[in-house]
Amino acid sequence: MAEYLKGIMEGIRQTKELNDQCIGKLDKDMELLRQYLTELSAMWEGPAHDTWHNEVMADIENLETIIVDLKKIAAYEGEAHKQYSNANQKSEDLITRI
C-alpha cells in the first residue's frame, strides 16, 4: 500500500511539474502573440481593423482566463502532493512507533 501511495504522489508531482512547464510556455507564447498582434495591428486601419482587433482582444482575454485557471489547477496539484506527503509521513511515523 505504501508503494502504491508513493506511486500516486510521484504521479501528482510529475503532473504538476509538467503543467508548470506548459503554463510557462503558454505565458511566453502569449507575450509573443501580443508582440506580433501589435505589429500586425499597425499595418492597417479602418472598420475591418477595428472589428478584427476587438475579436482578437476578446480571444486573448479568454486565453488569459484559461491560463489563470490552469495556474489554479497546478497550485491545487501542488497542495494535493503536499497533503499526500504529509499523510504518508504520518502513517510511516505511526507504523514505526508500533
Image: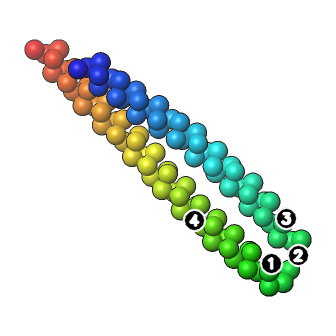
- Of all residues, the one furthest to the left in this rendering is 98
Secondary structure under the numbered disc 2 in the rendered image: loop
Who's the residue at 64% across and 44% down the image?
25
Please name the residue that numbered disc 2 is placed on: 44
In the rendered image, which residue does mark 4 sit on? Answer: 62
**Residue type, mark 2 in image:** Trp
Task: Please state, as top left, top right, bottom left or bottom right, where the C terminus lies in the image.
Answer: top left
Q: Residue at x 57, y 65 (%)?
A: 62
Residue pointed to by mark 3: 39
Residue 35 % position (x, y): 78, 60
Distance CA(mark 4)–CA(mark 2): 25 Å
Position of 35 with respect to 89 (left or right) is right
- Mark earlier in primary sequence (1, 4): 1
Residue 59: % across, % down: 63, 67
Labels 1 & 2 near each other (Cβ < 8 A)? yes
Element carrying mark 3: helix
Judging by the rendered image, the residue that carries numbered circle 1 is 49
The quadrant where residue 53 appears: bottom right
Q: Amino acid at mark 1?
A: His
Q: CA distance from mark 3 to mark 1?
A: 13 Å
- Three-letter code for the amino acid on which mark 4 is drawn: Asn
The Cα atoms of the two marked residues, 1 and 2, are separated by: 7 Å
**Label located before the other in sequence (2 or 3):** 3
The N terminus lies in which quarter of the figure?
top left
